[in-house]
Amino acid sequence: MGRALGVSDSADMQSVVTFNYIATVVTQKFFIAPRKLQVVGIRGVTRVAGNDGSAVTFAVYKSASGIAVGSGALLHSGTFDLKGTADTNQPLTLTGNQDSLILAPGDSLGVVLTGTATLAVGEVQVTVEPL
Amino acid sequence: MGSRSLGVADSSDAQKYVTVNYIATLVTQKFFVAPRKLIVTSIVGATRVAGSGGACTASFYKAASAVAVGSGTLLHAGSFNLVGTADTNQALTLSPVPGALTLNPGDSLGYVLSGTATSAVGSVTITLEPL
């Protein structure tokens, strides 16, 4: 939604963190918060759908320094499908646990990969706002 | 850096984030070109998989157009250790040199890799604010 000129709102301060992946992707962190932030949106899109025979998905987590990605807090229901239709947005439904969506300074965002990402190309975007 | 007071904007509300997600094939390169005057306010990274090819570090520079990364200006003391403990934040101490952290329009951010990044996976987040 575009802002009304002269009328600021919190969306004016949003930042978008993008994780671009190719077939060599592994479970990893991809952003470290320098200040307190809130996750307000997660969506992704495949450019090339993976072609492994089994399911291939990402789940997006937050985790503190010293904590592995998958040991952190899951930020949404469902998963991002790396075999989804090319160039078609997949918005993820954020968790109802608001505390899970708050990043303290030093907390990371990361993805946990399930399956094998053969041929997969795409990106996941996380929108954050300052608190 | 404190959280904002509601209704009282400050420069940190306008922060933007640039992330470098790397795998073992990374090489010395630029990864961001400033579209306007910006200042670097933090650099923090974490390994997901520590490199296994011996000592390996990355140093972050700013460089003008047509200037190689390593011929630019170093932005911090020390270096990011690609062989560091997995999932554990490494915050780099920013340069105190006046002007070193300011990017003019067209200046790039980049890193210089030292060593061999065998098996290395990780991410570095650079925080910028407009000037």
Image (cartoon, coloured by chain):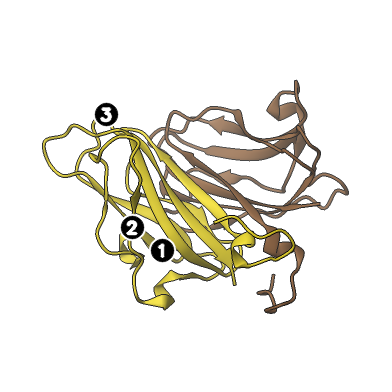
Chain colours: A yellow, B brown
Residue A5 location, x and y as percent? 71, 58
- Single out the mark in the foreground, 1 or 3: 3
Q: Which residue is mark 3?
A: A119
> Could you say which is closer to the camera, residue B120 or residue A12?
A12
Q: What amino acid is labelled 3 in the image?
A: Leu
At mark 3, the secondary structure is loop
For this view, does B5 lie left or right of residue A90?
right
Q: Is residue B64 visible?
A: yes
Q: Is A117 drawn above or below residue A70 in the view shown? A: above
- Single out the mark in the foreground, 2 or 3: 2
> Could you say which is closer to the camera, residue A4 or residue B55?
A4
Sort mark 3 into few (<14), some (14-19) or many (20+) by Cα contacts within 10 Å: some
Residue most extreme to the left = A53
The alpha-carbon separation of the residues under discs 1 and 3 comes to: 26 Å
Q: Is B128 drawn above or below residue A65 in the view shown? A: above
Q: Which residue is mark 1?
A: A62
Sequence-earlier tag: 1 or 2: 1
Sequence-earlier tag: 1 or 3: 1
Do discs 2 and 3 share a chain?
yes
The chain identifier of the residue carrying mark 2 reads A
- Single out the mark in the foreground, 1 or 2: 2
Q: Which residue is mark 2?
A: A92
Q: What amino acid is labelled 2 in the image?
A: Leu
At mark 2, the secondary structure is loop
Sort mark 1 into few (<14), some (14-19) or many (20+) by Cα contacts within 10 Å: many
> Could you say which is closer to the camera, residue A72 or residue A130?
A130
Q: Is disc 1 in contact with disc 3, using a CB cutoff of under 8 Å?
A: no
Name the quarter where the N terminus of chain B is drawn.
bottom right
At mark 1, the secondary structure is strand
What residue do we see at 15% from left, 44% from top? A55
Residue A84 location, x and y as percent? 24, 41
